[in-house]
Image (cartoon, helix red, strand yellow):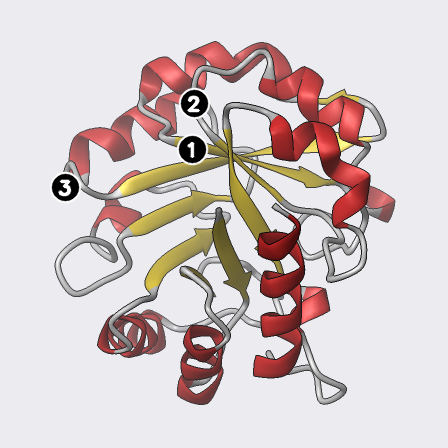
């Protein structure tokens, strides 16, 4: 099981995420108004910090619509994953796939509101365009997407996963105490791992090693 901890803004957070046993660290860029949004320079610096840990891979998390601009940020010394967290269409995924190195993994978020997923009918198109992994996340109040702390329903997750041919990451209000709510997702043959933000943060709002470690341990030991 992969564990992704999202929204690092400092080198100390990146190192703490690595020490907590995570596999992936999410770095925001092109998230207008986002509390963890990074400049391109800061993104590169933290991606290098992740690589220096010897275990973490950096994930560019973005709403950006420009495949060329995103391609210039990844590969080589940049993040080795791109998470398209907005409503980018399959055509943008295809353009990005053509521009980035073959070993860069493209993640497309599927946004779920209640039991409905706005991109459900496009799953096949996203796969044909070059999506490597899907991430299932909940839409919050007022249509807010990303770090909403809103949980998904396990049956909704498995129904969407049944429509996929690619693996998926599970997000949405995950924490150390709610693994048992997602038995169907965990047992699904395409389940790849979890993506956590809010539950890994301390009282100061920064990612905290102890909390990230507690989440990772709870989900992995239960599995």
Measure how far apart labels 2 and 3 are at the Cα level: 19 Å
Q: Height in image: 212 above or below 16? A: above
Query: CA–CA distance between discs 1 and 2?
Result: 6 Å
Residue identifier under label 2: 166
Badge 2, how many Cα within 10 Å: few under 14, some, many 20+?
some
Q: Earlier in the sequence, mark 2 or mark 3?
A: 3
- Could you tell me which residue is drawn at 61 percent across and 56 percent down? 221
Q: Residue at x 79, y 44 (%)?
A: 180
Sooner in the amino-acid sequence: mark 1 or mark 2: 1
- Residue mark closest to the camera, 2 vs 3: 2
For numbered disc 1, what is the local secondary structure? strand
Q: Residues within 10 Å of mark 1 (few under 14, many from 20)?
A: many
Residue 9: give x, y in percent of width and height. 49, 79
Q: Is residue 28 visible?
A: no
Judged left or right of residue 175, residue 2 is left
* Residue 209: percent from left, percent from top: 57, 81
Residue 101 is labelled as 3
Q: State if disc 2 and disc 1 touch (CB < 8 Å).
A: yes
Q: Position of residue 109 (x, y in %)?
A: 55, 36
- The Cα–Cα distance between marks 3 and 1, rounded to whole angstroms, is 16 Å
Residue 130 visible in the displayed image? yes
């Amino acid at each position: 099981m992969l564990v992704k901890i999202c929204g690092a803004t400092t080198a100390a957070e990146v190192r703490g995420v690595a020490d907590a046993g995570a596999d992936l660290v999410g770095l925001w860029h092109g998230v207008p108004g986002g509390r963890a949004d990074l400049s391109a320079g800061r993104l590169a610096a933290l991606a290098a910090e992740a690589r220096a840990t010897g275990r973490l891979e950096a994930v560019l998390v973005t709403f950006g619509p420009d495949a060329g601009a995103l391609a210039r940020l990844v590969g080589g010394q940049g993040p080795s994953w791109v998470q398209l967290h907005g409503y980018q269409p399959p055509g943008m995924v295809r353009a990005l796939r053509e521009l980035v190195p073959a070993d860069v993994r493209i993640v497309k978020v599927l946004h779920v509101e209640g039991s409905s997923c706005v991109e459900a009918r496009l799953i096949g198109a996203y796969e044909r365009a070059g999506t490597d992994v899907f991430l299932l996340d909940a839409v919050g109040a007022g249509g807010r997407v990303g770090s909403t702390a809103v949980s998904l329903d396990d049956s909704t997750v498995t129904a969407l996963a049944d429509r996929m041919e690619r693996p998926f990451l599970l997000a949405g209000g995950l924490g150390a105490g709610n693994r048992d709510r997602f038995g169907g997702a965990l047992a699904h043959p395409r389940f790849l791992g979890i993506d956590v933000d809010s539950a890994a943060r301390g009282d100061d709002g920064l990612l905290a090693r102890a909390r990230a470690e507690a989440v990772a341990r709870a989900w992995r030991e239960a599995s």
